[in-house]
Amino acid sequence: MIKAPNIILVGPMGAGKTTIGRLLSQSLGREFYDSDRIIEENAGADIPWIFEKEGEDGFRKRETHALECMLHNQESVVLATGGGIVMREENRELLIKSDALVVYLYASVSQQLHRTSKSNHRPLLQTSDPRATLTALFKVRDPLYREVATLVVETDSRHPKSVANKALEAI
Ligand code: S3P
């Protein structure tokens, strides 16, 4: 049987990857996975603990492993990835070489800040100036998201259902 392409969502913290991923999985009747949750399950610990004990590098290695596992999955899935998935060249190559529909959910720094302001489980945002951190990350990562993406969907002005529909149109 020919496997339908996986759908992989990339984009910054606060882009809505989990929300959109769930909507897409419901519409398509596919399983939804989130690389952060896979990492936590495999580690038996949460992300702040992993960052504290293994550093960001340890977390990134786990992230690559989770991505590889999902790409080898027999089923077609919807996968939401962590905002830093594009930082390792290895991951970018995996994404580009895969036949997945890679959707970059674009969000402005103001929206990222707004949408992440109520949670405190993101180690990279535990700084005195989250806006400056998000701005610096965005400068580096925006071109990398574009490098791996098949499709870019702007999320600032759209309702999550409309964002999901844009991705569905591309399937
Ligand atoms: C990270 C984003 C987080 C999580 C980790 C690191 C990043 O995922 O993977 O805290 O480097 O941008 P979300 O994008 O789902 O918040």
Image: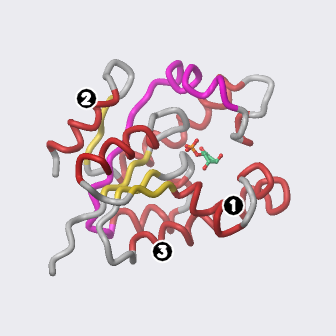
Say if 41 sits above or below 167 in the image. Answer: below
Left-right relation of 7 to 47 = left
| Residue at image mark 2 | 162
Left-right relation of 41 to 164 = right
The location of residue 109, given as percent across then percent down, is: 52, 24
- Label 2 vs 3, first from the N-terminus: 3
Q: Residue at x 71, y 67 (%)?
A: 43
The location of residue 15, given as percent across then percent down, is: 46, 34
Callout 1: SS: helix
Q: Residue at x 29, y 32 (%)?
A: 163
Outermost residue to the bottom: 1
Q: Which of the two residues, 98 or 7, is positioned nearer the viewer here?
A: 7
The answer to the question of whether label 1 and label 3 lie on touching residues, with beta carbons closer than 8 A, is no
Structural crowding at the residue carrying mark 2, measured as other residues with C-alpha within 10 Å and reported as few (<14), some (14–19) or many (≥20): some
* Ligand 1 lies in quarter: top right
The location of residue 151, given as percent across then percent down, is: 26, 45
Residue 69's disc is: 3
Give the amino acid type for the residue marked by disc 1 in the picture.
Phe
| Residue at image mark 1 | 59
Q: What span is in magenta? A: 97-119
Give the amino acid type for the residue marked by disc 2 in the picture.
Ser
Q: Nearer the viewer, mark 1 or mark 3?
A: 3
Q: Residue at x 64, y 23 (%)?
A: 117
Identify the image quadrant of residue 154. Answer: top left
Give the amino acid type for the residue marked by disc 3 in the picture.
Cys
Q: Which of the two residues, 75 or 139, is positioned nearer the viewer here?
A: 75
Q: Is mark 1 within 8 Å of ligand 1?
A: yes
Structural crowding at the residue carrying mark 3, measured as other residues with C-alpha within 10 Å and reported as few (<14), some (14–19) or many (≥20): few
| Distance of label 1 from label 2 (alpha carbons) | 32 Å
Q: Which of the two residues, 57 or 24, is positioned nearer the viewer here?
A: 24
| Distance of label 2 from label 3 (alpha carbons) | 30 Å
Q: Is residue 4 magenta?
A: no
